[in-house]
Image (cartoon, rainbow, N blue to C red):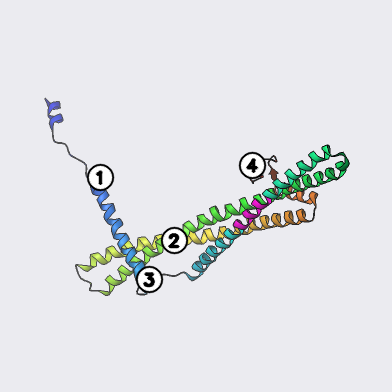
Amino acid sequence: GGRAQQKSGPVVLADEVKNPAMEKLELVRKWSLNTYKCTRQIISEKLGRGSRTVDLELEAQIDILRDNKKKYENILKLAQTLSTQLFQMVHTQRQLGDAFADLSLKSLELHEEFGYNAETQKLLAKNGETLLGAINFFIASVNTLVNKTIEDTLLTVKQYESARIEYDAYRTDLEELNLGPRDANTLPKIEQSQQLFQVHKEKYDKMRNDVSIKLKFLEENKVKVLHNQLVLFHNAIAAYFAGNQKQLEQTLKQFHIKLKTPGADAPSWLEEQ
């Protein structure tokens, strides 16, 4: 009988069990309020009515980064064009070499002349493939720097800028409340506003520190990467146009670059070790 009473007794729900619908509604409410405050702050700044927090040194570094990214993207685009054009030239030289070699076998009276022209075109194609490997290695490295490393830093910058807007929005709220009356009705609001302001200030300070650290590491990485790649690009181009095949091949060995088997359809002959 005792067991039957326990089974049929009242069920008590623990206090920590929450209604999922109410939790979702509360999240939406907070999101909407935050969005409203941030939108108001942005409009106020654009109209020249609201104040904004400015870190002059950090923002100058961010502006330089964005400007450099555009310039590096232009170099990348031009290098890709050069690679495509060089690939077409190498492909034509290889075909021309084959045509000369065929005629050398079929034209006895011009066997020698066709023969050394065939050798010259094949040598030019071989050196062109080597230069193409160096250029495509340069392209791959700069592309990683621009579209991964720098882009990752700029993503952190965007998060920092959003945190700055939130911080200023809640700072403005607190300043407005502090300018008004302080009574039993307003004091709880001021206290709550102070707490929210502190939360967003800590978030803003953290994001500002994160951006500073990423900018520092990015600068160190950028200098190292570009130094190596610019040396590679210069040495390979100089050796190719000087006709120094040995130096050209040595440049690729120095940077651990392997060439793919000639005759591939794609214009990239690059294969990193």
- Residue at the disc numbered 3: 46
Please identify the quarter of the rendering in which residue 106 is found. Answer: top right
Residue 251, horizontal then vertical, whole percent: 74, 50
| Range of residues picked out in magenta | 76-86
Q: Label 2: state its secondary structure.
A: helix
Q: Circle 2: is it few (<14), some (14-19), or many (20+) Cα within 10 Å?
A: many
The CA span between labels 2 and 3 is 19 Å
Please state which amino acid type lies under the numbered disc 2.
Tyr
Residue 170 shows in this picture: no
- The answer to which of marks 2 and 4 sits earlier in the sequence is 2
- Residue at the disc numbered 4: 265
- The answer to which of marks 1 and 4 sits earlier in the sequence is 1
Q: Which mark is residue 144?
A: none
The CA span between labels 1 and 4 is 57 Å
Q: Determine whether label 3 and label 4 are within 8 Å by CB.
A: no
Q: Label 3: state its secondary structure.
A: helix
Q: Which mark is residue 160?
A: 2
Q: Label 1: state its secondary structure.
A: helix
- The answer to which of marks 2 and 3 sits earlier in the sequence is 3
> Taking 252 as reference, is 24 left or right?
left
The CA span between labels 2 and 4 is 45 Å
- Residue at the disc numbered 1: 20
Please state which amino acid type lies under the numbered disc 3.
Lys
The CA span between labels 1 and 3 is 39 Å
Residue 65, horizontal then vertical, whole percent: 54, 63
- The answer to which of marks 1 and 3 sits earlier in the sequence is 1
Q: Nearer the viewer, mark 1 or mark 4?
A: 4
The CA span between labels 2 and 1 is 31 Å
Q: Label 4: state its secondary structure.
A: loop
